[in-house]
Image (cartoon, rainbow, N blue to C red):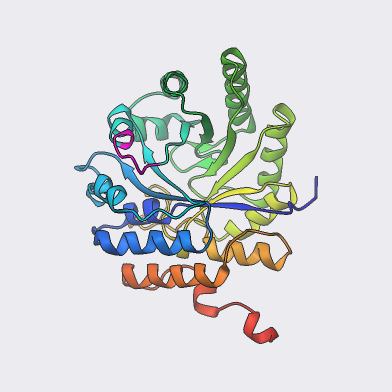
Amino acid sequence: MNSLPRRVEFHEEGPREGFQMEKKTYPLADRLALIDALAESGLKQVQCASFVSPRAVPQMADAPELFARLRKRPGTRYTALWLNESGFERARACEQVDLDGKIVFYVTEPFSQRNNNCSVAENRKRQLAWIDRYIALGIPLEQAYVVTAFGCNLGGPVPVTAVTDVVRWLADVCADRHIPFPAFYLADTMGWANPKEMQSRIGAVRQLVPEARIGLHLHDTRGLGGANVLAALQMGVDLFDSSVAGLGGCPFAGHKDGSASGNICTEDMVFMCEEMGINTGIDLEKLLEASRLAERIIGRPLNGHLMHSGTLAALRA
């Protein structure tokens, strides 16, 4: 398959993943201003915060207050992340959270143990319980993520069969419960993907669930983020997670000093799509204003390219 989609959807994760990765906690008013600027650009979904342990992630301790103070714009979903029942119940208690049923699979034992203190098999059982919980509450299962779907710094190379095994299992579960197969996300959590592997794994998933929507959660750890997006676009993928100004990343993906490169940069990828004639529904100039706001809030130069170079619009005038 080598046909570009006509339209691409970007789900913004900077306000959650980006600020969660920072060592300090930033003022609530600044984060709210950034969320509002992102929504104003036309982004259809913004992940705003995590409902996780305040002791483990103090940067997200004010998540309930953040959602209470949101000024929601029509046409944008304001989502959150949770990892356990306690976090989910805290999210449910916030009326302004747009709940999106999601599950997360691991394919390497070391990363599963590090993140969840359980095996890959036990985590799969937990995801089954989440599916049943969503069904009981009337929350559609929208997203299924396979983290480290291309390789893992802690567990090594990940064979394609590890990913397709999850697909088969989930397809059977959805069929048994008479629910639609969700958008299936391949996450390059630690920056192992390359364009050839991108197309190979997307193709393998499509062979098993040809009607399913495939999404990608990509990091730019080793500078291949844009190339991997292009390879996915050529396979018809039209759904990407991204972060304004390239915020975020994985704490296990960086250098020995603990640093980590960020996620694929929202405005850079939107620019690439628009230059290729692919509609995103996003006002790029407003998105650039949001990226520069993010840089002012963080207080250091960020990784986005377009925010520093500008678009080609003025040069073409």
Query: Would you say the magenta stretch is mainly helix, strand or loop?
Result: loop
Q: Position of residue 225 (x, y in %)?
A: 58, 57
What number of labels is visible? Answer: 0
Per the image, is 93 magenta?
yes
Say which of 223 and 306 sits in front.
Answer: 306
Per the image, is 227 magenta?
no
Q: Is residue 305 at all visible to an observer of this figure? A: no
Residue at the spot x=70%, y=28% of the render? 209
Extreme-top residue of the structure: 176
Residue at the spot x=80%, y=50% of the render? 3
Which quadrant: the N terminus? Answer: top right
Magenta span covers which residues? 91-97
Which quadrant: the C terminus? Answer: bottom right
Say which of 40 and 8 sits in front.
Answer: 40
Extreme-front residue of the structure: 74
Q: Is residue 289 at all visible to an observer of this figure? A: yes
Where on the picture, by quarter, is residue 121? top left
Q: Position of residue 213 (x, y in %)?
A: 65, 37
Q: Is residue 297 placed above or below 278 in the rendered structure? A: below
Q: Is residue 150 placed above or below 22 in the rendered structure? A: above
Extreme-left residue of the structure: 55
Is 53 left, or right, of 138 in this rendering?
A: left
Where on the picture, by quarter, is residue 81? top left
Where on the picture, by quarter, is residue 313? bottom right
Q: Position of residue 20 (x, y in %)?
A: 32, 52
Residue at the spot x=50%, y=74% of the render? 307
Q: Position of residue 246 (x, y in %)?
A: 47, 62
Say which of 187 and 4 sits in front.
Answer: 4
Residue at the spot x=62%, y=67% of the render? 271
